[in-house]
C-alpha cells in the first residue's frame, strides 16, 4: 500500500473484500458550509452511503498522511478548525510534506481515491471555467483532473457561479463524458436547469456502471461526470439564482476577492441573499448525490 495512505479499518476491510466504496471530499465540509451544518451533513452523507450498500471514505490530509476515511475526531477537525487549507493537485505534495491539515477539493479527492483504488466519488458540484474566464484564465483543476484520473464524479452539475457553457466545452476538449442521470439537461447546482445539454442520458446505476467499466477496460484514461439534478422539491428557480449570483459576483469584484477565496465568499454571500434556502438546497443535493453514487458503486462491483 502507498505509505502516505492511512485508511480506517472500515474502508480497508471493504477494499480488501471487494466491497463498493464511495469517496467523499473534505473541502465541502471545511469551506463549503458553516458549522454545525457541515458536520451534520458529513455524518448523514456517510450514513446514506452505508444505507445504500456501500462504504463511505471521506478523504483529507492530516499529519503527513492522506486519510482515506475519517473517524469522528477527524470529521470534527475538518468541520471546526480554522487552520484547514484548501488543497488541489497543485498544493497536494506541499500540504502533505509540511504536515498541515488540508481539505481536498474535487481534484485532490480524485487523486486520493485513485491511489486507494476507489472508483466513485460523490460531491456537490464540480469546479469549472469562471465567468470572464476568457480574460482571467481562471479554470478549475477539477476539469484537467477529470481528464486523467479514473474516478467517476457524481455531482449536481457545475457550481452555478461558473460559466457553465465554457465549462462543458472544456470538458469536451478534454474528452470527459458528461452523463445526464435521468436528465437530458445539465443541472446548475441549485437549479435543475442550465440551458445546456449533456453528452448522453443514462437512467439506471447499471447503465452508468456498464459505460464506466467499458471506458476503463478500453484503456481510455480519465473520469466521467454523472450529472444528477437536485430533487425537484429542493431545487431553486434558475432565474432567481442567476440574479443572486450576479449580485454576489459584483460584490466579490468590488472587494477584489480572487483565487481560492472566491468560491467560499460567493457561497456564503448567496446563502445570505437567499435567506439560507441555498444552503438547504446544497445539503439536499449532496444527500441525493451520495445515494446515487452508492448505487453506482454497487453496480460497478457487479461488472
Image: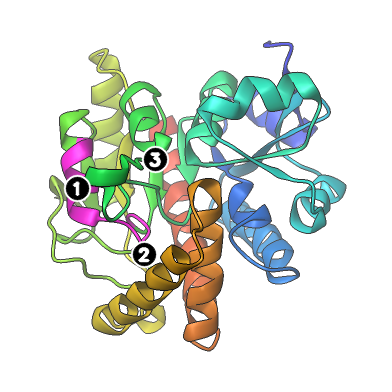
Badge 3 marks a residue whose secondary structure is: loop
Q: Please tell me how crowded label 2 is: few (under 14), some (14-19), or many (20+) other residues with Cα within 10 Å.
A: many
Residue 160: percent from the left, percent from the top? Answer: 33, 64
Answer with the quarter of the image where residue 12 lies: top right
Is 270 above or below relative to 160? Answer: below
Question: Which comes before the other along the chain, label 3 or label 2?
Answer: 3
Mark 3 or mark 1, which has the lower sequence index?
Answer: 3
- Residue topped by disc 2: 189
Q: Is residue 5 visible?
A: no
**Screen quadrant of the N terminus:** top right
Instruction: Look at the image and give the residue range highlighted in magenta.
Output: 157-171
> 30 or 50: nearer the eye?
30
* Marks 2, 1: nearer the viewer: 1
Camera-nearest label, 3 or 2:
3
Q: Are marks 2 and 1 in contact (CB under 8 Å)?
A: no
Any magenta on residue 111? no
Q: Which residue is mark 1?
A: 166
The residue at the point 36 percent across, 63 percent down is 161
Q: CA distance from mark 3 to mark 1?
A: 12 Å
User: Tag on residue 32?
Assistant: none
The crowd level at tag 3 (other Cα within 10 Å; few <14, some 14-19, many 20+) is: some
Checking the image for residue 140, the label placed there is 3
Q: Residue at x 42, y 64 (%)?
A: 253
Q: Residue placed at 65% from the left, 64% from the top?
A: 41
The picture places residue 138, in percent across and down from the top left corner, at 36, 43
Amino acid at each position: 500500500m502507498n505509505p502516505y495512505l492511512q485508511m480506517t479499518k472500515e474502508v480497508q476491510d471493504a477494499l480488501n473484500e471487494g466491497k463498493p466504496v464511495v469517496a467523499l471530499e473534505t473541502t465541502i465540509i471545511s469551506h463549503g458550509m458553516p458549522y454545525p451544518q457541515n458536520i451534520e451533513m458529513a455524518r448523514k452523507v456517510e450514513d446514506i452511503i452505508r444505507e445504500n450498500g456501500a462504504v463511505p471514505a471521506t478523504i483529507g490530509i492530516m499529519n503527513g498522511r492522506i486519510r482515506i476515511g475519517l473517524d469522528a475526531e477527524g470529521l470534527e477537525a475538518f468541520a471546526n478548525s480554522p487552520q484547514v487549507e484548501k488543497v488541489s493537485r497543485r498544493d497536494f505534495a506541499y500540504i502533505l510534506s509540511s504536515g498541515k491539515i488540508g481539505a481536498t477539493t474535487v481534484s485532490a479527492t480524485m487523486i486520493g481515491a485513485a491511489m486507494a483504488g476507489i472508483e466513485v466519488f460523490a460531491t456537490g458540484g464540480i469546479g469549472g471555467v469562471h465567468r470572464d474566464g476568457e480574460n482571467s484564465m481562471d479554470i478549475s483543476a477539477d476539469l484537467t483532473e477529470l481528464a486523467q484520473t479514473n474516478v467517476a464524479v457524481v455531482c449536481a452539475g457545475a457550481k452555478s457561479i461558473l460559466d457553465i457553457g465554457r465549462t462543458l466545452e472544456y470538458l469536451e476538449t478534454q474528452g470527459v463524458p458528461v452523463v445526464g442521470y435521468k436528465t437530458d439537461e445539465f443541472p446548475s447546482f441549485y437549479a435543475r436547469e442550465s440551458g445546456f445539454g449533456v453528452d448522453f442520458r443514462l437512467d439506471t446505476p447499471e447503465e452508468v456502471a456498464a459505460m464506466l467499466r467499458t471506458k476503463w477496460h478500453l484503456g481510455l484514461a480519465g473520469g466521467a461526470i454523472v450529472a444528477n439534478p437536485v430533487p425537484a422539491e429542493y431545487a431553486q428557480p434558475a432565474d432567481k439564482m442567476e440574479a443572486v449570483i450576479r449580485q454576489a459576483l459584483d460584490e466579490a469584484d468590488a472587494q477584489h476577492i480572487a483565487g481560492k477565496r472566491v468560491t467560499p465568499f460567493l457561497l456564503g454571500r448567496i446563502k445570505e441573499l437567499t435567506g439560507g434556502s441555498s444552503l438547504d438546497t446544497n445539503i439536499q443535493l449532496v444527500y441525493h448525490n451520495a445515494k446515487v453514487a452508492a448505487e453506482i458503486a454497487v453496480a460497478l462491483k457487479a461488472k
